Structures are given as C-alpha cells and as structure tokens.
Amino acid sequence: MMNTRTLLAIALSPVLAASMLASSCSVFGSTSAAEFRTDQELVRPDAEVYRRWVYVGSPVTPNDLNNGAAAFPEFHNVYIDPESYEHWRHTGTWRDGTMLVKELVSVGATSATSGKGYFEGDFIGLEATVKSAARFPDEPGNWAYFSFTNKDGGPLKDTATPFATASCNACHASNAASDFVFTQYYPVLRDARGGR
C-alpha cells in the first residue's frame, strides 16, 4: 500500500513538471530587466531591485597604481539580472535582453583593522549596459551603454541615452572575453561556466 506522501508526490508530479518547464521558459525567454521610457531612453534601475540580482564582483583600478591617472579609478560593483546569469551559466552566451548594472563607488580608506588595502567609500555614479537586437541593431553585438551619473556631482539622472558607439563598444570588442563582457575578470562568471 502506498502511503500518503507517495500519493501526494504522484499527484503533484505533473504540477512540478509544468512549473519546471515554465521556469525554464522564463530563463531562456526574451524578457528583459531593462525598462525604457522611449526607444533609446533607459530608465534608471532601482537599487532595491538590482542589488538583489547576481553580484559578480567589484574591480578597481586605483589612481595610485596608474601614475595618478586611472581611466576608471573607482570600484565598479557589477550586477547581472538573474535570467541572463542563468542563460550564461547554461549556454556560455549572453541572451538578448541581458542587463548589467555597475555601481561606481569611490576608493575610501586605504587601511583598516585587517591591514592596508582599498576599501569602498561613497556611491558616486551608476552605469548600465543592455543587449537588444531590436533596440540597438546597429550597435556592435547589439550592446548599448548608459550612464546615470551627473557630471556636476548632483543626484543620479532618472534616464539615460546610449553613449556614442566609439565611447565603449570599441574597447569591449577588443578586450572583453565573451561577447563584449569582461568575463575574464569575474571568477563568479568563470566558475558558473566550470572555469571555461
């Protein structure tokens, strides 16, 4: 005789299978975490949302290791929307709709109780990149890059339009390991692909 747990498992198996299929379709679907006000105007992502995404790392190229003139002297806290991370993990490719968010954080203290080092200071900017064949058919790899940072140091902008192609795409095309993304500098992404 079957016990109640076994009967329940048998009864729920079609439901679980349907749920798993729906989850798989969602992961490999064509949805995007990016919200646009107009065709080219990206709405600033909500920190309460993207800080729950997959955090992949915080590279920093400080001024004092670059003759006082680093191109990007701040920490870059990088987050990837979960669906795109799962797609990357399973396929090694970046799906249409992928969104990466990069918080810019100043280099703060250079010593702590643990010793000398580089420690994050204050939030100073926010950037994002989105892959979309429909919105950016003429951009290399269909990637567009955005900044919500105010150059005058004021509050972040509510929306942003793409940088000119030459501003970001050329460097990413020449140096990024995987479809315009610098996966080589993020062990979380390398590990997700089994070190590949």
Image (spheres, rainbow, N blue to C red):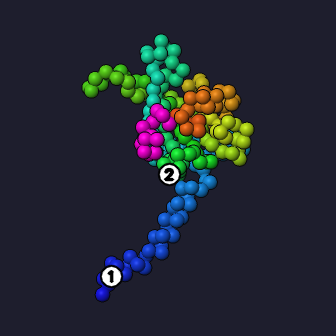
Amino acid type, mark 2: His
Is 190 inside the magenta-drawn segment? yes
Distance Cα–Cα, label 2 vs label 1: 36 Å
Residue at 53 percent of width and 31 percent of height: 125
Q: Are marks 2 and 1 in contact (CB under 8 Å)?
A: no
In the visual, does 80 lie left or right of 130? left
Q: Give the mark nearer the N terminus: 2 vs 1.
A: 1
> Which residue was labeled with disc 1?
4
Principal SS element in the magenta part? helix
Is 72 inside the magenta-drawn segment? no
Q: Nearer the viewer, residue 115 or 169?
A: 169
> Which quarter of the figure has residue 112?
top left
In the visual, does 123 lie left or right of 160? left
Residue at 57 percent of width and 55 percent of height: 28
Q: Which residue is farthest bottom?
A: 1
The image shows residue 93 at horizontal and vertical percentages of 56, 45
Q: Which residue is farthest top?
A: 67
The image shows residue 37 at horizontal and vertical percentages of 68, 45
Up the image or down, 55 lies above or below 87; here it is above
Q: Which residues are magenta?
A: 183-196
The image shows residue 89 at horizontal and vertical percentages of 48, 48
Amino acid type, mark 1: Thr
The image shows residue 80 at horizontal and vertical percentages of 51, 43
Residue at 55 percent of width and 38 percent of height: 178
Q: Which mark is residue 62?
A: none
Q: Residues within 10 Å of mark 2 (few under 14, many from 20)?
A: few
In the visual, does 50 lie left or right of 8? right
Secondary element at tag 2: helix
Secondary element at tag 1: helix
> Which residue was labeled with disc 2?
90
Q: Nearer the viewer, residue 134 or 175?
A: 175
